Structures are given as C-alpha cells and as structure tokens.
C-alpha cells in the first residue's frame, strides 16, 4: 500500500512584500487562513502570525456611532517586520552591552560563583532594562565559539549539560544471510534432517551475565544447549564450530535465527551451508526453538 504525504514542504523563507500584498487581498475576499496558505504555498501558522503582526485597529462612523474594528494591512505587516529585524541582535556581539559582558565575565570567573548563567541574565535584565542583553542560549553560543573570555568550563551548569549526540540506529548490519521468505519448501515441511533453529536464553540481563545457547533440529526436535559466559556474536560462532566438530555424525545444513546482534555473524560460518533470518518481532517463525 503506497503511503501518501499531503504535507507541503516549507522553504523557511521570510515573507516578501508581494506576498503580504496577496495576503491582504485574499483576506479581504474572505478567504480563511488555510485557503490563503494553500494559494501562497505557505504553512497556515505563517499566515496566522502574519495576520496578527499586520492587523491594526480602525475606527469608522456608522449611523452616528463610532465603531472600532480590526483589519490587516500589508504595509503595517511589512513595517513591523523590518522593525523586528532591525532590533534582532542574535549572535551580534558588537550590539551587546559592554557593561553587561564585563560584569558577566567577572561573575563567572569567581572562585565561588553564586549565580548561574540563567540567574545572572534574569537579575541583570530587571536592573538594566535599557541595555541590550543576550539570551542564555546566545551566551552559551558565544562561549562555545570562543567569542568570550570565559570558557564552557567556567559556567556552573555547562559541565553538567550533555552535548547532543546523533541517534544511533537500532538496526545492525548482518554479515551475510537471507530472509526466511527465501527458505526452501523442504525446510518448511520438515521432511529433511539438518535444518536447525537457534536462540539465546538470557536471564535478568545483567552486564556480562552468562547466557544459554540453544540449537533445535526442526525434523526430530533434537536439542543442543551450551552455556556461554556472556552474549557475543564471535562467541556464538566459536561455540557453533565446537558443536559441529563434536557432532560430526549430524548434518548442519541451515540455521534459522532471529535478528539479534549476537547472530549477526552467522553468515561467516563455513560449517553451515546457509543462514536464514526471521522477520523482526516474529518469534512464531522459529516456534520449534521457542517452545
């Protein structure tokens, strides 16, 4: 079944004066915010914020009564936009109060620092409202980029702040092996000896806890179990080689495993003809071993 995505990809560009003119025209025509967004190829939240930005209170005389109403004007929206951009000081160090930076550096370098970055900024904002003071996040950015005298280690909370890390994929690459969908019919019908299912029995999942390796032959249900000191793909392969050497009279044609990382290297075994992997979260596909 194909997956349909109806979300419009946003370009994250600021609205232009022409777009604001179109918004004013469409808004006067009675178009809703969603309809305006679709016609301009914008997110409806962008249109909503722009309407609030450019709306002004108007007054008119109707039947000798003064009536106040609100209306959006593109010129008002554009003027407020330019004013906001003019007053934007994000990462502009030359716009920041020199007095604030001097006191901030002195405070952070004290041996006994009674203020965090957050508390110092809030306290200073209340005392000196007219000065241009960067936000806490901006100060951390200044420090990380080496624009301030203080370093990250000088900040009381910075050493406890964990840096963002990329999410590691929960999937692991198999060295070799096929999907269980490719398993021959002779294995499915259990008409031939030598086709095994493998699994690990794990206890309470303590670190480096011993585990139990189990192998069950599909036709005869003959089972082999070995205790391993801990869970490891290399250790599993080593133990299987020992089992094949010990039971030379038995055939080990194929092994069916789950997608656990401990079985990711089964394809490297030379003593087994083929390896098949069950679908994720499908323990019933290896029911013989599970039972």
Image (cartoon, rainbow, N blue to C red):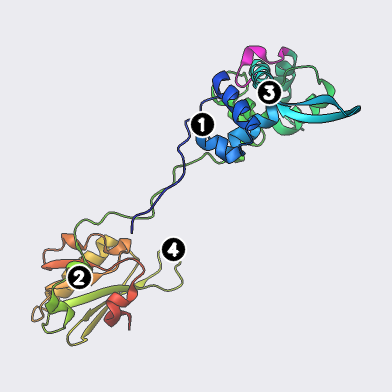
Q: Residues within 10 Å of mark 1 (few under 14, many from 20)?
A: some
Disc 3/disc 2 C-alpha distance (Å): 77 Å
Residues 230 and 17: in front is 17
Disc 1/disc 4 C-alpha distance (Å): 57 Å
Say if residue 226 shows up in the picture. Answer: no
Q: Quadrant of the C terminus?
A: bottom left
Disc 1/disc 2 C-alpha distance (Å): 64 Å
Which one is in front in this view, the residue at disc 1 or the one at disc 4?
A: 1
Disc on res. 40: 1
Image: 73 above or below 30? above
Occupied quadrant, residue 248 = bottom left
Q: Secondary structure at mark 3?
A: loop
Which one is in front in this view, the residue at disc 1 or the one at disc 2?
A: 1
Residue at the image point whose x is 58% and y is 26% from the top: 141
Occupied quadrant, residue 130 = top right
Image: 30 above or below 256? above
Disc on res. 240: 2
Disc on res. 207: 4
x%, y% of residue 217?
19, 81
x%, y% of residue 76?
69, 20
For residue 241, side relative to residue 78 (left or right): left
Disc 2/disc 4 C-alpha distance (Å): 23 Å
Residues 116 and 277: in front is 277
- Start and end of the magenta stretch? 89-98
Sequence-first tag of 3 and 2: 3
Residue at the image point whose x is 23% and y is 76% from the top: 197
Of all residues shown, which one is farthest toward the front?
Answer: 63
Sequence-first tag of 1 and 2: 1
Disc 1/disc 3 C-alpha distance (Å): 17 Å
């Amino acid at each position: 079944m194909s997956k349909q995505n109806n979300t419009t990809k946003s370009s994250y560009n600021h609205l232009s004066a022409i777009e604001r003119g179109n918004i004013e025209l469409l808004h006067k025509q009675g178009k809703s915010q969603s309809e305006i967004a679709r016609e301009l190829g914008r997110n409806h939240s962008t249109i909503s914020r722009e309407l609030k930005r450019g709306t002004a209170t108007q007054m008119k005389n109707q039947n000798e009564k003064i009536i106040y109403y609100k209306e959006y004007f593109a010129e008002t929206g554009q003027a407020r936009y330019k004013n906001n951009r003019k007053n934007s000081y994000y990462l502009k160090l030359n716009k920041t109060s020199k007095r604030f930076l001097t006191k901030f550096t002195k405070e952070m370098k004290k041996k006994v620092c009674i203020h965090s970055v957050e508390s110092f900024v809030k306290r200073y904002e209340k005392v000196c409202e007219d000065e241009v003071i960067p936000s806490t996040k901006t100060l951390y950015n200044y420090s990380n980029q080496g624009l301030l005298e203080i370093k990250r280690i000088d900040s009381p909370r910075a050493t406890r702040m964990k840096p963002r890390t990329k999410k590691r994929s929960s999937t692991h690459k198999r060295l070799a092996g096929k999907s269980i969908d490719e398993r021959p019919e002779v294995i499915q019908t259990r008409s031939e000896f030598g086709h095994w299912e493998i699994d690990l029995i794990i206890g309470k999942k303590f670190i480096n806890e011993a585990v139990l390796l189990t192998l069950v032959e599909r036709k005869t249900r003959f089972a082999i179990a070995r205790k391993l000191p801990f869970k490891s793909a290399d250790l599993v392969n080593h133990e299987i080689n020992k089992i094949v050497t010990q039971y030379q009279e038995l055939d080990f044609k194929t092994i069916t495993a789950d997608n656990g990382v401990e079985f990711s290297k089964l394809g490297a075994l030379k003593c087994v003809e083929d390896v098949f992997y069950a679908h994720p979260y499908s323990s019933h596909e290896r029911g013989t071993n599970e039972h």
